[in-house]
Amino acid sequence: MIRLALLGALLVAATARAALENSDCYACHGDKELVRTNANRQVQSLYVDAKAYDVSIHGKSLCTSCHADIKDVPHPDKLKPVSCAQCHGRKQETKTPGLQPPVVAFAYEHSVHGLARANGVTKAAACADCHGKHDIFRPTSSQSRLHWQQIPATCGRCHEKAYQDFGRSIHGKALAKGARDAPVCTDCHGEHTITAAKAETSRVSSGHIPETCGQCHGLERIATRYRLPSNVVQTYMQSFHGLALQMGGVAAANCASCHGFHDVLPSRDPSSSVNQANLPHTCGKCHPGIGTRLAKGDIKIHRPPGADKDKPWLVNFVTRFYIVLIVLTIGGMAAFNALDYLAKTRAHVCAARVAGGELRMSKGVRVQHLLMMALFIALVYTGFVHKFPDAFWSWPFRALQNGAHVRGMIHRIAGWAFTLLFAVHLMALFGTARGRGYVTELWPRFHDIKDGLRQLFHNLGLCKEPPPHRRFNYAEKAEYWALVWGSFVMIVTGAMLIFTETVLRMLPKVWLDVAQVIHYYEAVLATLAIVVWHFYWVIFDPKEYPMNPAWLIGNKAKGTP
């Protein structure tokens, strides 16, 4: 009778308010004797649920926030299933502090668990299976099912075999000892975004396993703390299997193919799949019939090609023999060809000097050309080293203790020297009679367009005669004025990048970003123009080969265009 009276009083009080308070719920669910039988015929204490909810992360929220269909007391026995997407859904925007972003429910819906439930698999994990129902705590709390030490047990409620294997593994044993760095299920599989292992997007698919394992085994901190090899990911990627995997060979052996998945053990463990005695079986899964000789051999997949003190002496001998053979053979070829090229160039220059011809570059112009060559090479090299510090051509500065500072100093000195050279050239060009004569001869004319088209038609066999000889043809004019314009652009943008503070005081930051982009791509354009255009006309053109000697002696042989 007392309980009925209490329920009656609660009903009257609740109807007088707009919504039920948690205290209204606890009036009944706080009764230690109140129990129910769930769908599995298990007796549950509603008091325990209420106490768990009261101290959970949701404890300050109304019970009716989840059980939205409860409007009064007593309520129906059969309630609608609780949807976590009400708050954690993709369409629900909320400003509640600490609430997971709306993408969580969306990610779960597209995970292997969410898709399974959508297809009617009722045993597939839902939110409450991992997070709990009323007893939800933050993952940082040791009471949470998703605390890092509890995650394997939580996942093991459904994946029992994987849980047992993990417990015996080196990772599971490290976790049991309290090693926070030991990986757990979510570190490899993900959380709400878990996909089927065979799916291409899965973090544990064949193509992504090295990347997933590399999250730990590629970190210097992990390798140093636990005395692990620091280059296992890099050396694997350089191995035959790693290279095949990078080229799309999904059948190539990856980390898990050899070490296992959940049952990873150290190689010294007799049960390990990579123990020397077990290699015939492990490798035999892909390479049947290899026999017991493999166990006696030297199998180290994490070692790139080359000599190694741990390799058999015969392997090291053959490796060194071929290195010496390659150096002597190719080096000898290169030296012989270099001497041949120099001899032919010297003969070509001597012939041009004897034959005479019109003066194309005065001594002053040749000096400027030599200085510009040296500065251009220095600027391009140090500039690209800054952009690509890990490239093979950057090794000299990586080898230096303060290589970045040295590179920057060389680049700036060469840049200011180039600016000075450009200013001197402009003064000589417009401030002297000879310079103004060069300007007149180099100035673009209408006939340059006709000459270019005529050369094109001649190369295509549509015109019998090439364009007439001129002291400076269309190609040389185009290249010269492109050099002038490109030099101006590089100087201006380079100065903006040096005087950053001044630029930011005068202009919005976007202009500094634009200057950086222009400076880089103008350098790429200039470098490619030199290699593709200039080198052809002064070196690889059959009429000029082995080179146009004008930059050395001022003129070239008679009869050449």
Image (spheres, rainbow, N blue to C red):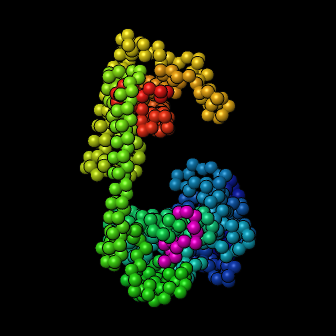
**Viewer-side residue, 85 vs 242:** 242
Give the dominant element type of the magenta stretch: helix, strand or loop: loop
- Occupied quadrant, residue 72: bottom right
Where residue 87 appears, as percent x and y from the top left, is 63, 56
Residue positioned 34% across, 30% down in the render: 552
Q: Vertical placement of 17 versus 129: above or below? A: above
Q: Is residue 253 magenta?
A: yes
Residue positioned 29% across, 32% down in the render: 413
- Occupied quadrant, residue 484: top left
Where residue 162 appears, as percent x and y from the top left, is 54, 79
Residue positioned 55% across, 79% down in the render: 286
Where residue 70 appears, as percent x and y from the top left, is 70, 63
Which segment is the magenta one?
Answer: 246-258
Q: Vertical placement of 226 versus 408: above or below? A: below
Q: Vertical placement of 405 versus 268: above or below? A: above
Q: Is residue 329 magenta?
A: no
